[in-house]
């Protein structure tokens, strides 16, 4: 291995360690309360090494979100992916994928909200990362007749609903009751599917009864 290759590998390892450490610290104490020295200490790296990779905490968060959305894009190749949102089963697949993805990326999802609240410019940049995903999702409405509004607005309303519901129950604790994943997914599925189709889709429980 050449010295140049070794340096690149070491740099990549440090960057990965900083990202992993940031996720742990964000989960433990929140994005707003996290200092760069908290991240470097968690990663076991010198404080100055951070700036070899990121200009600041905001740039690190952006890098985490780019990685996160790239992972989400890979998920749409999984078995069962159907783009026809006139079907309840297609909506449920996407809702389930979103719900589990949100669970796996709680530190980033909460950090995204916190960062957007205190830095409008950063919030706008971070929201731009979701534009491609929303456009992709909007394409799934092509076979839905009589949408309640413009497809772009329908997609925005749908994703906002899912995001707020997930935050309320997975982060804020909801009303304090236990909410099983399948119950949450079926409720969101029926809510979204009925809203976009004007139908009366039965819940997962009713369908299996």
Image (cartoon, rainbow, N blue to C red):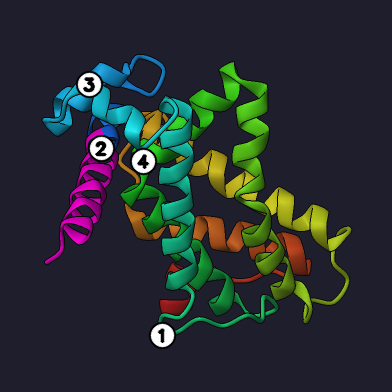
Specify the label residue 47 is tagged with.
3
Q: How far apart are marks 2 and 3 (CA)?
A: 11 Å
| Total labels drawn | 4
Task: Please report whichever mark, 4 or 3, sits nearer to the chain's N-terminal start.
Answer: 3
Task: Please report whichever mark, 1 or 3, sits nearer to the chain's N-terminal start.
Answer: 3
Label 4 packing within 10 angstroms: few (<14), some (14-19), many (20+)? some
SS of the residue at dot 2? helix
Q: Do the residues labelled 1 and 3 touch (CB within 8 Å)?
A: no
Which residue corresponds to the image point at 52% horizontal and 30% vertical from the top-left? 113
Quick one: quadrant of the C terminus? bottom left
- Residue 21 placement, left or right of 86: left
- Residue bearing the label numbered 4: 106
Specify the label residue 109 is tagged with.
none
Which residue corresponds to the image point at 36% horizontal and 47% vertical from the top-left? 105
- Up the image or down, 163 lies above or below 21; here it is below
Which corner quadrant of the image does residue 26 belong to?
A: top left
Q: How far apart are marks 1 and 3 (CA)?
A: 43 Å
Residue 17 among magenta residues: yes
Q: Distance between the residues labelled 4 and 3?
A: 25 Å
Say whether residue 50 is visible: yes
Q: Depth-wise, is mark 1 or mark 3 nearer the camera? A: 3
SS of the residue at dot 1? loop
Q: Depth-wise, is mark 2 or mark 3 nearer the camera? A: 3
Which residue corresponds to the image point at 15% horizontal and 63% vertical from the top-left? 2
SS of the residue at dot 3? helix
Q: Distance between the residues labelled 1 and 4?
A: 24 Å
Which residue corresponds to the image point at 47% horizontal and 34% vertical from the top-left? 59
SS of the residue at dot 4? helix
- Residue bearing the label numbered 2: 18
For the record, the magenta segment spans 1-21
Label 2 packing within 10 angstroms: few (<14), some (14-19), many (20+)? many
């Amino acid at each position: 291995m050449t010295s140049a290759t070794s340096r690149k590998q070491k740099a990549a390892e440090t960057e990965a360690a900083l990202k992993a450490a940031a996720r742990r610290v964000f989960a433990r104490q929140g994005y707003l309360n996290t200092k760069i020295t908290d991240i470097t200490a968690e990663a076991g790296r010198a404080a100055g090494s951070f700036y070899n990779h990121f200009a600041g905490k905001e740039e690190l968060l952006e890098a985490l979100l780019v990685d996160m959305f790239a992972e989400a894009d890979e998920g749409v190749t999984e078995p069962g992916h159907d783009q026809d949102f006139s079907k309840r089963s297609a909506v449920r697949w996407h809702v389930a994928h979103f719900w589990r993805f949100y669970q796996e990326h709680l530190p980033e999802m909460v950090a995204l909200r916190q960062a957007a609240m205190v830095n409008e410019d950063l919030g706008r940049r971070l929201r731009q990362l979701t534009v491609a995903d929303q456009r992709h999702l909007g394409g799934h409405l092509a076979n839905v007749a009589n949408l309640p509004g413009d497809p772009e607005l329908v997609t925005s309303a749908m994703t906002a609903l899912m995001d707020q519901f997930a935050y309320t129950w997975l982060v804020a604790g909801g009303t304090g009751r236990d909410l099983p994943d399948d119950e949450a997914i079926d409720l969101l599925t029926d809510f979204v599917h009925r809203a976009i189709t004007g139908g009366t889709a039965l819940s997962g429980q009713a369908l299996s009864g």
